[in-house]
Image (cartoon, rainbow, N blue to C red):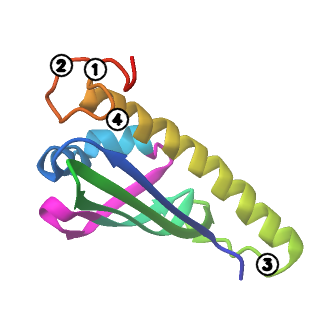
Amino acid sequence: MAGVNLVDETFIAVPPETLAEVVADPARWRVWWPDLQLRVFMDRQLAGQRWSMTGALLGSCEIWLQPMLDGTCVHYYLRGNPCHGDPPVEHELPDTPAGWRKADAIRRHRALAWKRHIWALKDELEGDRPPGQPPGSGERTSPVGQ
């Protein structure tokens, strides 16, 4: 069976406490995944959340927040199969080249949508922080050698 599997990592220069608050907000989920219904099955507090998902996909979704350097690495995992109908019925993609292509098309679409959301969040939370400066630093320095 071909399924949709997506893994992503993005560094955001804010502490995990800041991101944990955002990740736990159901209003954000509806923006990030408008065609999915999520149910928390593991609230990992500062380490993120894990959800069961239904809607366009049936499976699981996770955001793991890993403290790193002067910020947080946001790990995103999505595993599922297309789902149709009411009540939702899992539609397994065939384990064939056509099924693999369909799974890849869904994965690509979701990967691009996620990157737009996570980069917008990065812009929102980091603000005008210059690259290479600590969080909360509003001072801009000239590039090395100038």
| Furthest residue in direction front, as rendered | 145
Which numbered circle lies on residue 138?
A: 2
**Closer to us: mark 2 or mark 3?**
2
The Cα atoms of the two marked residues, 1 and 3, are separated by 47 Å
Q: Amino acid at mark 2?
A: Gly
- Residue labelled with disc 1: 128
The residue at the point 22 percent across, 43 percent down is 22
Q: Amino acid at mark 4?
A: Leu
> Which type of secondary structure does the marked residue at label 2 adopt?
loop
Quadrant showing the N terminus: bottom right
Q: Nearer the viewer, residue 102 or 128?
A: 128
Mark 1 touches mark 2? (CB < 8 Å): yes
The Cα atoms of the two marked residues, 1 and 2, are separated by 7 Å
Mark 1 touches mark 3? (CB < 8 Å): no
Left or right: 85, with 99 as reference point: left
Q: Where residue 56 sits in the image (x, y, percent)? A: 57, 56
Left or right: 8, with 18 as reference point: right
Dot 1 or dot 4: first in sequence order is 4
- Residue labelled with disc 3: 94
The Cα atoms of the two marked residues, 2 and 3, are separated by 53 Å
Q: Which region of the structure is painted magenta?
A: 33-49
The residue at the point 40 percent across, 55 percent down is 37
The Cα atoms of the two marked residues, 4 and 2, are separated by 18 Å
- Residue labelled with disc 4: 121
> Which type of secondary structure does the marked residue at label 4 adopt?
helix
